[in-house]
Image (cartoon, rainbow, N blue to C red):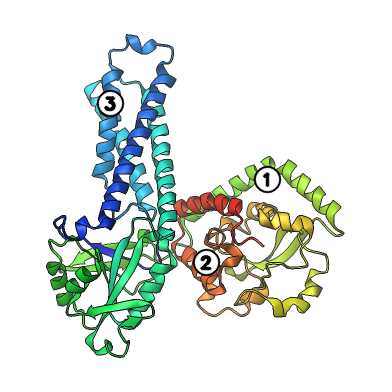
Amino acid sequence: MTSATLLSPVRTTPGPESGPAGSPARADERAYIRVLVVLDTAVLTVALLAGYLARFGDGRASGSEISYVLVAPALLVAWLVSLKALGCYDDRVIGYGADEYRRVGTASLRLAGGIAILGYVADVNVSRGFLAISFAIGTIGLEATRFAARKRLHRARSRGIGWSRRVLVVGEAAHVLELVLTLRREPYAGYHVVGACIPDALLAPVAQRLGDVPVVGSLRGIPEAAEAVGADTIAVTASGELTATRLRRLGWQLEGTGIDLVVAPALTDVAGPRIHTRPVAGLPLIHVEAPEFRGARKLVKGFVDRATATVALTALLPVLAFLALAIRLDSRGPVFFRQTRVGRGGLEFGVWKFRTMVVNADELLAELVSRNETDGLMFKMRDDPRITRVGRVLRKWSLDELPQLVNVLLGQMSLVGPRPPLPSEVARYDGDVARRLLVKPGMTGLWQVSGRSDLSWEDGIRLDLYYVENWSLAADLTILWKTFGAVVNSRGAY
């Protein structure tokens, strides 16, 4: 998933080691990239060895005209070169976002295609089985190790000890605060704000601080302010004083300093695949594609949803039967709880769940309203007395939601989507929030992998709207993968 604010990088010429390029942050960055290179080399070595053993484990390679002792190392080098050529070690893409994974996959596929074409043209009979197994294991291994390395980096960044960019935010005070809030919302993205520069007229009123961010200068001395706080990145947000001419001159001033210049336009909650930069008359225009709510990709998503639900229901039938028996033995009442929710287009449907509360839970709600622990339109209590003993276990591991696979099979829900709202919530929606109803609700979603009940109402709505505007099949797969981690860790489950 991407940050809510688009940071468009304008790379400046690298500077001497004594400048920001030689700072501890840059040293940590280079160390992280070296680790990635070592991991990639190890993964590819294992993949090529596994491909050889799987194909020639019986020793038949000895009669081949090709010497795999030479082919394997050459393929290893070519693979690493392909990764490098497609920017898989570029600090602008590693550590955050889906682009890193996309580039790794593209580099592997292009190399495989190139080798296939070269082998055909040159009439070189390299074993197709060896290549297929090696590329399959290697590509999956590369993606897996990148994911593991990133997770470790994210944990380090969240604790304030990982490689992060030291950012000086520049612009109007209100826009600076908004950008700071956005960057701090996702500390694992690696943007650590160390200071701000604002217009001269605002320096005195803010008493040299914007919240807890120190104001280290005005818009007239941005490079000097960046050097003073050791910033390696300058993030420019909206400001009437920073015209196109002044912004271009700022880029010139940063040449040779090793400081990156990024521009944060007033365009939020739009993912990268919908954004394209088009140079027109020397002006980089940002073209934003409209959200996609129908078409071939939607048909594919619907097919994948129903096929997966069919397989999952068949495989989980013994588990569902066991859970149903546990609910029946634990407390009086039906096994299933069917509640009216609102789906795509405002159509109501009955969502299926395992019952986790006592049968008169709705009657007891009025007595508990004053103890609501969340804001907005939802009711949540960490220690809700209406929940049964088995119900607490089901909720902790999200097992109560498994019957929703039936809703997915019926086409009322999707595997991934916004949280299915109650009719009472929808009745109080304003124009913006109602956009959640443009797609099917999901069994899981960004809200599920970002904290579930621990999220505020505002954050939950923001994540749902972000998904509606920027959904993709690749993002759905990522969310499904993250859902397993969220369920295992029981984050926000009560």
Whether residue 228 is visible here, answered yes or no, is: yes
- Residue in front for this viewpoint, 369 or 75: 369
- Residue depicted at x 53% and y 67%: 438
Front position in the image: 399 or 383? 383
For mark 2, what is the residue? Answer: 464
Q: Earlier in the sequence, mark 3 or mark 2?
A: 3
Say the numbered circle drawn on residue 73: 3
Q: Quadrant of the N terminus?
A: bottom left
User: Is residue 255 toward the left or the right of residue 481 in the image?
Assistant: left
Quarter of the picture holding the C terminus: bottom right
Please say if the residues under marks 3 and 2 sit with CB atoms less than 8 Å apart.
Answer: no
Q: Which residue is mark 1?
A: 313
The amino acid type of the residue labelled 2 equals Asp
- Which residue is at the front of the view, 296 or 222? 222
Mark 2 Cα shell of 10 Å, populated few (<14), some (14-19), many (≥20): many
Query: Pointer 1: residues within 10 angstroms few (<14), some, or many (20+)?
Result: some
User: Which of the two discs, 1 and 3, labels the residue nearer the N terminus?
Assistant: 3
Distance between mark 1 and mark 2 Cα atoms: 26 Å
Q: Residue furthest top?
A: 63
The amino acid on which the numbered mark 3 sits, given as a three-letter code, is Pro
Mark 3 surroundings within 10 Å by alpha-carbon count, few (fewer than 14), some (14 through 19), many (20 or more): some
Identified by mark 1, the residue type is: Leu
Q: Is residue 74 left or right of residue 351?
A: left
Q: Quadrant of residue 59?
A: top left
**Relative image position of residue 267 (x, y in whole percent):** 35, 72
Q: Residue at x 29, y 79 (%)?
A: 215
Place of residue 386 in the rendered image (x, y in percent of width and height, measured from the top left): 78, 67
